[in-house]
């Protein structure tokens, strides 16, 4: 048991160092998890496909009914 806790504590510590910040929110039962989906960027020929890709991804996640998407106007 102690090894498992040590492993997860170490993994969380490494994640914080790599990612810089981790936010954990516990939802109430029946509440949809909220996620923020940033726009993906491409390079070269892929760049012209990024706007339709990002719009499709956001729309598909939004209409899935499984998630609550955070509006892009709130993103930093």
Image (spheres, grey):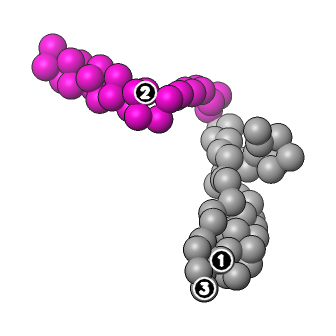
Q: Are marks 1 and 2 in contact (CB under 8 Å)?
A: no
Residue reaching furthest bottom? 45
Whichever of labels 2 and 3 marks the residue nearer the N terminus, that label is 2
Q: Do the residues labelled 1 and 3 touch (CB within 8 Å)?
A: yes
- Asked if residue 42 lies in the magenta stretch, the reply is no
Q: Is residue 13 above or below residue 44?
A: above
Kindly identify which residue carries mark 2: 16
Q: Residue 47 carries which label?
A: 1
For the residues carrying marks 2 and 3, which lies nearer the camera in this image?
3
Residue 17 in percent (x, y) is at 40, 27
Left or right of residue 21: residue 3: left
**Which residue appears at 82% of the width and 48% of the height?**
71
User: Within 10 angstroms of label 2, few (less than 14), some, or many (20 or more) residues?
Assistant: few
Q: Distance between the residues labelled 1 and 2?
A: 30 Å
Q: Are marks 2 and 3 in contact (CB under 8 Å)?
A: no
Q: Distance between the residues labelled 1 and 3?
A: 5 Å
Give the overall secondary structure of the magenta segment. helix
Residue 12 in percent (x, y) is at 36, 26
Residue reaching furthest right? 73
- Label 1 residue SS: helix
The magenta-colored residue range is: 2-29
Kindly identify which residue carries mark 3: 45
**Which residue appears at 63% of the width and 66% of the height?**
41
């Amino acid at each position: 048991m102690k090894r498992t806790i040590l492993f997860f504590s170490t993994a969380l510590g490494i994640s914080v160092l790599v990612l810089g910040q981790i936010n954990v929110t516990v939802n109430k039962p029946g509440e949809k998890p909220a996620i923020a989906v940033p726009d993906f960027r491409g390079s070269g020929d892929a760049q012209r496909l990024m706007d339709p890709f990002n719009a499709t991804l956001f729309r598909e996640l939004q209409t899935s009914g499984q998630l609550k998407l955070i509006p892009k106007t709130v993103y930093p």
